[in-house]
Image (cartoon, rainbow, N blue to C red):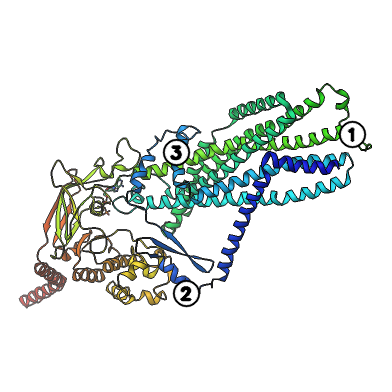
């Protein structure tokens, strides 16, 4: 009877004080809804037919579909099917408005838990939680509901524990069996709650990562004029951006989502367990408990190392090591030709050792910290707990009662002493369990402080990436023109790191070395004008191409008005630049020709594979599709194609896009002269105006103007007319005939000698 009442009392108590049924019902509803939804998703996935490898390859090639409103639907192959992910275009002014939230922080700032950290975290959290109704907020709420539920269940379990031991002490068999039944009943929601908490935490971390990654990608891969992916790698920018965008974002999101659980759950536990305990401990005990918390916090704070800075340095060293590894992968052939394996190994080993030494030093610092933490929280707190529990027992004034603590022999029911012992035992077991849970919660909360410090380190790194990206300034705009490309009084300068700013914002300033001064050229599309830029190595030829492409600023020379760059837009029908180093994109053979177009844009352009074949014929690569088993073949083209083939592919792109102006930066240096000549002739026949950068004088015949950069301290230059096509051809013919005549010189000299010999013989005779 007593036991039945006590079980009912537990449930009543829990129900009255904690609204458990409400919470349990709510949680059950959420669980059921979640389970039925995942079951529905699974059944839909199973019911959908798996696509054939051919169809999947088609989807990989297609990449995305474009909706009429500009929204892109990404086609992601997943488990034998194609999942559609809608990507809304980021509004043009979005990042401009967001930049105000990311002012640059001085590089001297050390990560710590302070106002700067809070401000940075808040700025980043506005990206990860864009609105109160976003899915991320709902996930946090669901996560919180399960955290509360777990605490409520823990209190229930602690009380039940006490009741079960009480039944044992009083030898109450039926009550003990009922208690065990309830114990298993509690086990079901408790274990489920634990796994749900872990699941929701991982899910939240993944969603935060997706938000941040999408934001960073949009910002980083911004098109002209921002070109942040280019500017950030310039002097004064950030090194190892790949580490920031891949590892650091993932680590930050994991840390943030874990921290929420690690702080929220123990805090809640501390409140609820303290409230529960204070009932049996009384006012004096509760005050002592809080004193204990305060002292613990002070001790641990004193022994906590600067985990934030350590985490930030670790991420940086990790990035350096990763960049080194990437470099070997990217340039393995060059290293292999030089036989530089041993040298590269020592460079990499150096980077790795620096990382490992740092991680080791963190481990060492952790030993002292964790030792103190374990000692204080596990042993000191437990000893304190015993002391607190003993206060009401030992100092209640009733010594006879206190001596009777322990397992007693069963007494006749209704015996007052037996009931008192059972009560004390129950109280002791419940309180002890609560105290252990409290020690555990305290430990986790103290440990969470270390996590906060580490989060501060990761926040500093992520904030550095975002604020640097936001601070990069685009070059001043050019004057748009349909058919003219001109530079008027432009100084071509190497971007220096401007004063007062950490980012390479000085792309727009002329604080660096001036390579060419007051450069003026003007070309008109469709008039047959073509420019050859020449000069010795390092004189600034590519720099001129960078200015034309909008990578470097077209700084006005002096105070001249009207100075600057005039040109059409980049791309189809505008300006197209083929760089010195060949670039092969990841994807199919077809993707190599149409780059930077996507497959969808290729389809929309109305061109066909036959057209592409004609283009490959023009660059003497017609054999490639057959050799590589078709247009859809996907390979590491950088390694498959030879240097000359890669350069011809660059020219194929020019013929595919048919720009008005093509800037060709030594992009045919590895191509044989005959093929080079035919490609130039083909480009001209398509009406493309050529701006060629080359050291080969033989290319002069395809151009009308010659710009020579002198490479002197004054940055002087000269531009001369090469002559009309007929004149140039005439000169060419003359050169050929003179060369042929020169080749005959030896024969003539021999003949002269023969004749002299014959004459000499005749005279003697
Ligand atoms: N980002 C940079 N930072 C500092 N200096 C740079 C940068 N880019 C180029 N330079 C310097 O500017 C000068 C001109 O470079 P550019 O690439 O234009 O030479 P180039 O005339 O094309 O030479 P080459 O014929 O060898 O290709 C070089 O001395 C180079 O070192």
Q: Is residue 90 above or below residue 639?
A: above
In the picture, the disc for residue 54 is 2
Q: x, y percentage for residue 456?
A: 50, 38
Query: If the image is split into quadrants, where does the N terminus sit?
Result: top right
Q: x, y percentage for residue 236?
A: 35, 42
Quadrant housing residue 67: bottom left
Q: Quick one: label 3 or label 1, which is nearer the N terminus?
A: 3
Q: x, y percentage for residue 484?
A: 16, 58
Left or right: 464 in relation to 390 = left
In the picture, the disc for residue 596 is none
Which residue is drawn at the image coordinates 79% and 37% (left, top)?
429
Q: Quick one: label 2 or label 1, which is nearer the N terminus?
A: 2
The crowd level at tag 1 (other Cα within 10 Å; few <14, some 14-19, many 20+) is many
Query: If the image is split into quadrants, where does the C terminus sit?
Result: bottom left
The residue at which mark 1 appears reads as: 418
The residue at which mark 3 appears reads as: 120
What whole-number distance in Å separates the C-alpha atoms at marks 2 and 3?
47 Å
- In depth, the one of 191 and 465 nearer the eye is 191
- In depth, the one of 634 and 331 nearer the eye is 634
Q: x, y percentage for residue 153?
A: 70, 44
Does the beta carbon of the residue at mark 1 sit less than 8 Å from ligand 1?
no
- Indicate the secondary structure of the residue bearing disc 1: helix
What whole-number distance in Å separates the C-alpha atoms at marks 2 and 1?
80 Å
Q: Are marks 2 and 3 in contact (CB under 8 Å)?
A: no
Q: Quick one: label 2 or label 3, which is nearer the N terminus?
A: 2
- In depth, the one of 601 and 142 nearer the eye is 142
Q: Is residue 430 above or below residue 337?
A: above
The crowd level at tag 3 (other Cα within 10 Å; few <14, some 14-19, many 20+) is many
Left or right: 437 in relation to 680 = right
Which residue is drawn at the image coordinates 13% and 43% (left, top)?
560
């Amino acid at each position: 009877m007593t036991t039945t009442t006590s079980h009912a009392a537990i449930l009543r108590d829990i129900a009255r004080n904690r609204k458990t049924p409400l919470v349990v019902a709510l949680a059950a509803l959420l669980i059921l809804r979640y389970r039925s939804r995942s079951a529905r998703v699974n059944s839909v996935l199973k019911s959908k037919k798996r696509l054939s490898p051919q169809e999947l390859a088609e989807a990989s090639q297609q990449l995305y579909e474009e909706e009429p409103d500009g929204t892109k639907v990404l086609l992601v192959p997943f488990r034998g099917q194609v999942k559609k992910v809608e990507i809304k275009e980021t509004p043009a002014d979005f990042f401009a408005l967001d930049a105000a939230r990311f002012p640059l922080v001085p590089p001297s700032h050390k990560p710590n838990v302070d106002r700067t950290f809070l401000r940075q975290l808040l700025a980043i959290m506005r990206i990860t939680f864009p609105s109160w109704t976003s899915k991320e907020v709902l996930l946090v709420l669901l996560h919180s509901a399960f955290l509360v539920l777990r605490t409520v269940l823990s209190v229930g379990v602690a009380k039940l524990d006490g009741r079960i031991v009480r039944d044992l002490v009083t030898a109450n068999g039926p009550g003990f069996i009922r208690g065990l039944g309830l114990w298993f009943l509690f086990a079901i929601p408790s274990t489920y709650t634990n796994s749900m908490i872990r699941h929701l935490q991982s899910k939240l971390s993944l969603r935060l990562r997706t938000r941040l990654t999408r934001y960073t990608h949009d910002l980083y891969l911004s098109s002209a004029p921002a070109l942040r992916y280019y500017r950030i790698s310039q002097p004064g920018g950030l090194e190892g951006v790949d580490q920031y965008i891949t590892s650091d974002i993932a680590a930050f999101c994991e840390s943030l989502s874990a921290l929420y659980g690690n702080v929220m759950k123990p805090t809640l536990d501390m409140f609820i367990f303290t409230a529960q305990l204070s009932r049996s401990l009384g006012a004096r005990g509760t005050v002592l408990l809080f004193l204990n918390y305060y002292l613990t916090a002070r001790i641990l704070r004193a022994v906590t190392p600067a985990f934030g800075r350590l985490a930030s340095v670790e991420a940086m060293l990790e990035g350096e090591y990763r960049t080194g590894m990437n470099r070997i992968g990217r340039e393995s052939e060059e290293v292999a030709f030089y036989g530089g394996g041993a040298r590269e190994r020592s460079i990499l080993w150096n980077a790795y050792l620096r990382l490992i030494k740092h991680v080791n030093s963190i481990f060492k610092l952790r030993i002292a910290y964790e030792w103190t933490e374990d000692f204080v929280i596990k042993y000191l707190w437990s000893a304190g707990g015993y002391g607190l529990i003993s206060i009401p027992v030992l100092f209640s004034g009733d010594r006879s009662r206190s001596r009777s603590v322990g397992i007693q022999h069963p007494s006749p029911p209704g015996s007052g002493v037996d009931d008192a012992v059972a009560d004390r035992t129950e109280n002791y077991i419940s309180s002890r369990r609560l105290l252990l849970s409290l020690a555990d919660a305290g430990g986790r909360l103290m440990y969470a402080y270390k996590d906060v410090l580490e989060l501060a380190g990761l926040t500093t790194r992520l904030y550095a990436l975002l604020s640097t990206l936001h601070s990069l300034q685009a070059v001043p705009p050019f004057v748009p023109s349909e058919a003219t490309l001109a530079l008027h009084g432009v100084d071509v300068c190497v971007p220096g790191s401007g004063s007062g700013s950490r980012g390479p914002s000085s792309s727009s300033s002329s604080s660096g070395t001036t390579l060419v001064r007051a450069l003026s050229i003007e070309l008109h599309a469709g008039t047959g004008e073509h420019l050859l830029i020449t000069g010795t190595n390092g004189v600034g030829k590519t720099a001129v191409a960078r200015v034309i492409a909008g990578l470097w600023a077209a700084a006005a020379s002096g105070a001249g008005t009207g100075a600057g760059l005039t040109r059409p837009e980049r791309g189809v029908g505008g300006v197209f630049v083929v760089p010195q180093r060949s670039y092969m994109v990841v994807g199919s053979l077809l993707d190599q020709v149409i780059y930077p177009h996507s497959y969808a844009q290729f389809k929309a352009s109305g061109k066909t594979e036959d057209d592409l074949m004609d283009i490959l014929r023009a660059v003497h690569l017609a054999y490639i599709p057959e050799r590589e088993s078709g247009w859809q073949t996907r390979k590491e083209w950088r390694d498959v194609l030879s240097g000359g083939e890669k350069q011809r592919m660059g020219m194929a792109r020019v013929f595919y896009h048919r720009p008005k102006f093509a800037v060709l930066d030594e992009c045919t240096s590895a191509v044989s002269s005959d093929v080079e000549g035919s490609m130039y002739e083909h480009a001209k026949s398509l009406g493309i105006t050529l701006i060629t950068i080359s050291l080969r004088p033989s290319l002069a015949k395809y151009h009308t103007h010659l710009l020579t950069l002198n490479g002197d301290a004054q940055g002087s230059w000269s531009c001369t007319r090469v002559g009309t096509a007929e004149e140039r051809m005439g000169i060419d013919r003359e050169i050929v005939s003179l060369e042929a005549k020169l080749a005959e010189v030896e024969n003539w000299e021999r003949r002269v000698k023969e004749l002299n010999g014959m004459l000499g013989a005749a005279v003697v005779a």
